[in-house]
């Protein structure tokens, strides 16, 4: 009996720690999105600014290359966060299935887009958010190609 209680307590502690780590990853996800989106927005503003519109190597090549590299880093960090969250969710679900409703905790924080989004209400936010770095990366590639063709 005591051994069963120890196992239950161990699983309860594991569940608690997994839940805390899940919410920590959620905060990290939001911070990552904010930092990289802000950085790329600033780079686009610098590249599109009339103040910086002179033909300089820095604006024509360095800014798009830096933007492209930051988009790649952004994408890979989102993939890492996604896989960590999926792993945590799988383990939490195993514990919930094994012990029933006693351990249940709603982890559907940002997994689904709001009901108001037409046609996309079942798309996971993690998938939608990975579109941003790809989209901005394409913008940086076109900007770089445009400047290379102009040269």
Image: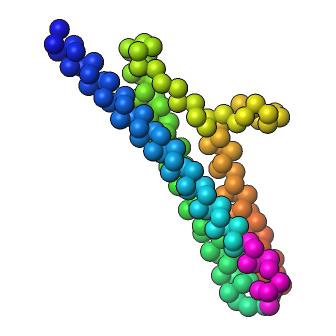
* Residue 32: % across, % down: 56, 56
Range of magenta residues? 44-54
Left or right of 120? Residue 103 is left
Q: Residue at x 83, y 34 (%)?
A: 118
Q: Nearer the viewer, residue 142 or 30?
A: 30
Q: Quadrant of the C terminus?
A: bottom right
* Residue 5: % across, % down: 22, 15
* Residue 129: % across, % down: 66, 48
Q: Residue at x 69, y 63 (%)?
A: 137
Whether residue 145 can be seen here: no
Q: Residue at x 72, y 84 (%)?
A: 59
Colouring chosen for the image of the structure: rainbow
* Residue 125: % across, % down: 65, 41
Q: Looking at the image, which residue sits at the far top?
A: 1
Q: Quadrant of residue 148?
A: bottom right
Q: Quadrant of residue 115?
A: top right
- Would you say residue 46 sits in the magenta stretch? yes
């Amino acid at each position: 009996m005591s051994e069963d209680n120890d196992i239950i307590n161990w699983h309860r502690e594991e569940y608690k720690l997994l839940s805390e780590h899940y919410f920590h990853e959620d905060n990290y996800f939001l911070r990552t999105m904010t930092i990289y989106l802000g950085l790329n927005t600033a780079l686009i503003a610098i590249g599109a600014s009339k103040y910086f519109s002179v033909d300089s190597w820095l604006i024509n090549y360095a800014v798009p290359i830096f933007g492209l590299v930051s988009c790649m880093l952004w994408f890979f960090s989102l993939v890492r966060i996604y896989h960590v969250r999926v792993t945590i969710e799988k383990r939490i679900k195993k514990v919930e299935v094994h012990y029933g409703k006693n351990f249940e905790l709603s982890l559907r924080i940002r997994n689904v887009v709001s009901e108001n989004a037409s046609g996309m209400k079942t798309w996971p936010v993690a998938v939608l958010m990975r579109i941003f770095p790809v989209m901005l990366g394409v913008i940086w590639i076109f900007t770089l190609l445009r400047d290379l063709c102009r040269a």
